Amino acid sequence: MSKLRQIDDDQLVQRFFDHDYRDRGVIKWQGFYLSDHTAALKKQAKQEAKKYPARAQQSLEDMSQLLSEAFANGQTVSIQLNNRDLNGDFLPDLVGKVIGYEDDMVYLAGHDGVGLMDMRNVERGTTRVDSRI
């Protein structure tokens, strides 16, 4: 009898897994994330979802003129670089006050030097809310 009972139990268990049980996959592990982790993941996903549209390619003369005026007047500028991420999207603008320049390098407060040849577009003011640090 116990042998027969064992077979019935095994069949019952197998039937349950074959027809009734639904594995929730990764969902069952999401409860283990800390709120800090989920907040960081949401922030990262939001940042990755942002797209920065291409602005018109300006001439070197136009960009130099705008940067020179911003430097003289202590104004903030937004610089879109020609660099793109792995998806081919433009990176966030560099935003800051022009604090100096040397040859073809421009220096913004809070940023490393930026080559004039790497720039695509320069605008006065902080028209872009996101900036790389």
Image: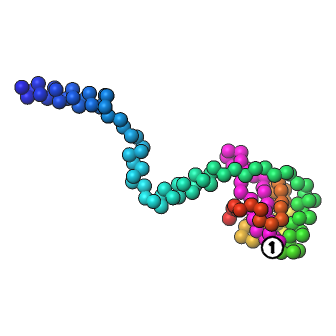
* Residue 122 visible from this viewpoint: yes
**112 is higher (above) or lower (below) than 55:** below
Q: Which residue corresponds to the image point at 73% horizontal and 52% vertical from the top-left? A: 52
Q: Residue furthest left?
A: 1
**133 is higher (above) or lower (below) than 99:** above
In magenta stretch: residue 21? no
Instruction: Name the residue type under label 1.
Output: Ile
13 left or right, relative to 91: left
Highlighted magenta segment, given as a residue range: 75-98
Residue 120 is situated, as x and y percent measured from the top left of the image, at: 82, 54
Label 1 secondary element: strand
Q: Which part of the image, by quadrant, shows the N terminus? A: top left
Q: Hey, which quadrant is residue 87 in on the image?
A: top right
**36 is higher (above) or lower (below) than 99:** above
Q: Hey, which quadrant is residue 35 in on the image?
A: bottom left
Counting every numbered tag in the picture gives: 1
Residue 44 is situated, as x and y percent measured from the top left of the image, at: 58, 55
**85 is higher (above) or lower (below) than 16:** below
Q: Which residue is mark 1?
A: 99
Q: Which residue corresponds to the image point at 40% horizontal and 40% vertical from the top-left? A: 25
Task: Decide: few, some or many residues near mark 1? Use Cα within 10 Å; few <14, some 14-19, many ≥20.
Answer: some
In magenta stretch: residue 94? yes
Residue 114 is situated, as x and y percent measured from the top left of the image, at: 79, 62
Residue 99 is situated, as x and y percent measured from the top left of the image, at: 80, 73
Q: Which residue corresponds to the image point at 90% horizontal and 70% vertical from the top-left? A: 69
55 left or right, relative to 28: right
* Residue 103 visible from this viewpoint: no
Q: Which part of the image, by quadrant, shows the C terminus? A: bottom right
121 left or right, relative to 31: right
